[in-house]
Image (spheres, rainbow, N blue to C red):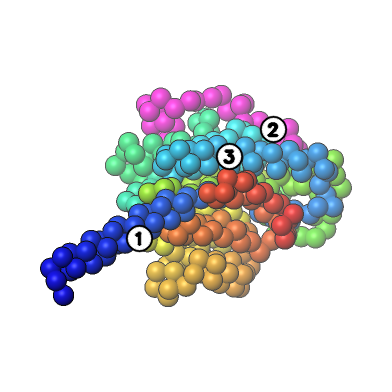
Amino acid sequence: MSGKRIFIIFVIVLISNLLATAQNQQKDMDRFTIVIHGGAGTILKKNMTPEKELEYKNKLKEALTAGYSILANGGNSIDAVETAIKIMEDSPLFNAGKGAVFTNEGKNEMDASIMEGKTLNAGSVAMVNTIKNPISAARMVMEKSPHVMMVGEGAVKFAKEQNLEIVDSAYFYDEKRWLQWQNIKGSNDLELDHSDDRAENNRKEFDAEFSDDGDRKFGTVGAVAIDKNGDIAAGTSTGGMTNKMYGRAGDSPIIGAGTYANNKTCGVSCTGHGEYFIRKVVAYDISALMEYKNLTLQEAADIVIHKKLKEIGGSGGIIAVDSHGNFSLTFNTEGMYRGSMTKEGKPIVSIYKGND
Ligand code: ASP
């Protein structure tokens, strides 16, 4: 073969390799995705009015779209997750930030956490009562402190130093939440967001009392996203559960239990009966099953939510995104407020089992 021919072949191979690389990069950049949840539980269509349903769906869409715009414009997944969660924290529809549930002392004590999959950096706050957006405080702990978790007064002091917005504790008050607490105040009952834990009789009484909108204010919130660089982030924020004991923290502020992110595998945000999620280290377990057993995200989520969690009586769900941009919205309850938005740019939100 002449030198000229070899050179031509070389150039052709080089060009096709460059084209393939460019195509792969384009494909990688296309995988940006965001998923969110607003809590899981006994959410039944028969208990919901069309107006209330629309209100939830619109708020979920607003949160999704805000996070998505950040990703679509080349922004990072941590910003997308924080932005989406803040919108839900600011809405009394959800049990996080404004509208958080009451403790057995009639207070709002909130938990939140956030994690980035590239560095495995994470931050969380627990039992905070005057930070308007606990998710932003969790992010500050991650970025501006040498620690992962800060609690109570110390966390609030730190948030103030970071110039986060501090509000009077009355800001979080929501009448329905207050009534929920009045309903079980003084008892040893815990009003979980995830009401399938409640005795059936209690449930009926409760439904009768709150039949105006029929739901039980399910509503821990969370978001998971992958950006155009392939970086995954996950975050969760909650008021916990009604009538929880003073000092109780759930899974939401615990990295590995309620929130986890690792670029090698996936990002996960959980909602459910926290004590069970802590014992089963749910968020990390999904990632570990992918890492050590090579399971797909959906296979791992199914095993953890439908088998491992259920075996010990735990109810709830997860939202997750893997490193290819695949996502999973998996729950073992009647419903989960949830939504997804991929590069197609269409927010898809659902509440009940199925696609509704
Ligand atoms: N996991 C939260 C907790 O136990 C509650 C929830 O997800 O609604 O505090």
Magenta span has 302? no
- 94 and 345: which one is in front? 345
Asked which secondary structure carries label 2, the reply is: loop
Q: Where does label 2 land, which residue? A: 174
Kind of element beneath mark 1: helix
Real-space Cα separation, disc 2 to disc 3, in angstroms: 26 Å
Q: CA distance from mark 1 to mark 3?
A: 32 Å
Q: Residue at x 44, y 64 (%)?
A: 287
Tell me which label, 2 or 3, sits earlier in the chain. Answer: 3
Image location (x, y in percent) of residue 329: 60, 58
Q: CA distance from mark 2 to mark 1?
A: 55 Å
Q: Nearer the viewer, mark 1 or mark 3?
A: 1
Q: Is mark 2 within 8 Å of ligand 1?
A: no
Q: Give the crowd class for mark 2: few <14, some 14-19, many >=20 residues within 10 Å.
A: some
Where the C terminus falls, by quadrant?
bottom right
Q: Which residue is mark 1?
A: 20
Q: Hey, which residue is sitting farthest left in the picture?
A: 3
Q: Nearer the viewer, residue 41 or 58?
A: 58
> Cβ–Cβ below 8 Å for labels 1 and 3?
no
Q: Inspect this view and state whether residue 28 appears.
A: no
Does residue 311 lie above or below 333 as drawn? below
The quadrant holding residue 275 is bottom right
Q: Give the label, 2 or 3, closer to the camera.
A: 3
Instruction: Check whether the beta carbons of the residues at disc 2 and disc 1 lie within 8 A of each other.
Output: no
The residue that appears at 70% across and 43% down in the rendered structure is 57
Amino acid type, residue under disc 1 in the picture: Ala
Magenta residues, start to end:
151-179
Which residue, given by chain and number where applicable, does mark 3 sit on?
65
Label 3 sits on a secondary structure element that is helix
